Amino acid sequence: QVQLVESGGGLVQPGGSLRLSCAASGGTFTIYTMRWYRQAPGKQRELVASITSGDSTNYADSVKGRFTISRDDAKNTLYLQMNTLKPEDTAVYYCHMFIGLGGLRAYWGQGTQVTVSS
């Protein structure tokens, strides 16, 4: 069974940096588009960044120039480097992957809390 395990969240001061990771396990499979979402208290989940299997990337306007999404297909791992963090970046961050394993399915990570506060 495919599982996505996230790590790297925590508490950071405004202007600081964090790096999130999301590792997929549970078989031999192909991963297509990977995404990071976030959900702040009282708000809808929003798309933060995405990366295709061809390494084409897209970012929400609110994080452009500050966040960088990347992937390591040899490790089945997705990353999100977050720099110049702001209090409004505080949210639970979720990874999302389209994985081909006996059919194409979408999988979610369990979420990791990022808190930006002084």
Image (tube, rainbow, N blue to C red):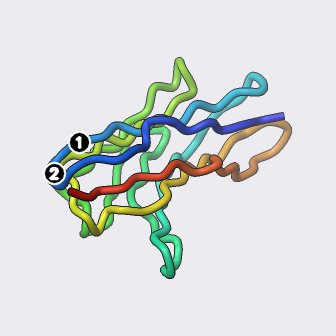
* On screen, residue 23 above or below 55: above
Q: In the image, what residue occupies the spot 32% across and 66% down?
A: 60
Residue contact between numbered discs 1 and 2, judged by CB atoms under 8 Å: yes
Q: Residue furthest top?
A: 74
Q: In the image, what residue occupies the spot 50% across and 81% down?
A: 42
* On screen, residue 68 above or below 62: above
Q: In the image, what residue occupies the spot 26% across and 49% down?
A: 67
Tally the marks: 2
* On screen, residue 27 above or below 109: above
User: Which of the marked residues, 1 or 2, is nearer the chain's N terminus?
Assistant: 1
Which three-letter amino acid code belongs to the residue tagged 1? Ser
Residue 97 marker: none
Q: Position of residue 14 (x, y in %)?
A: 18, 55
Which three-letter amino acid code belongs to the residue tagged 2? Thr
Q: In the image, what residue occupies the spot 52% across and 30% down?
A: 77
Return the residue nearer the eye: 47 or 19: 19
> Which residue is under mark 2?
84
Element assignment for label 2 = loop
Task: Please indicate whether residue 116 sits to the left or right of residue 52 in the image.
Answer: left
Where's the N terminus, which quadrant?
top right
> Which residue is under mark 1?
17
Find residue 54 and report its image quarter. top left
Q: Position of residue 107 (x, y in %)?
A: 69, 49
Task: Please indicate whether residue 104 sits to the left or right of residue 18 in the image.
Answer: right
Task: Please indicate whether residue 66 sits to the left or right of residue 37 in the image.
Answer: left
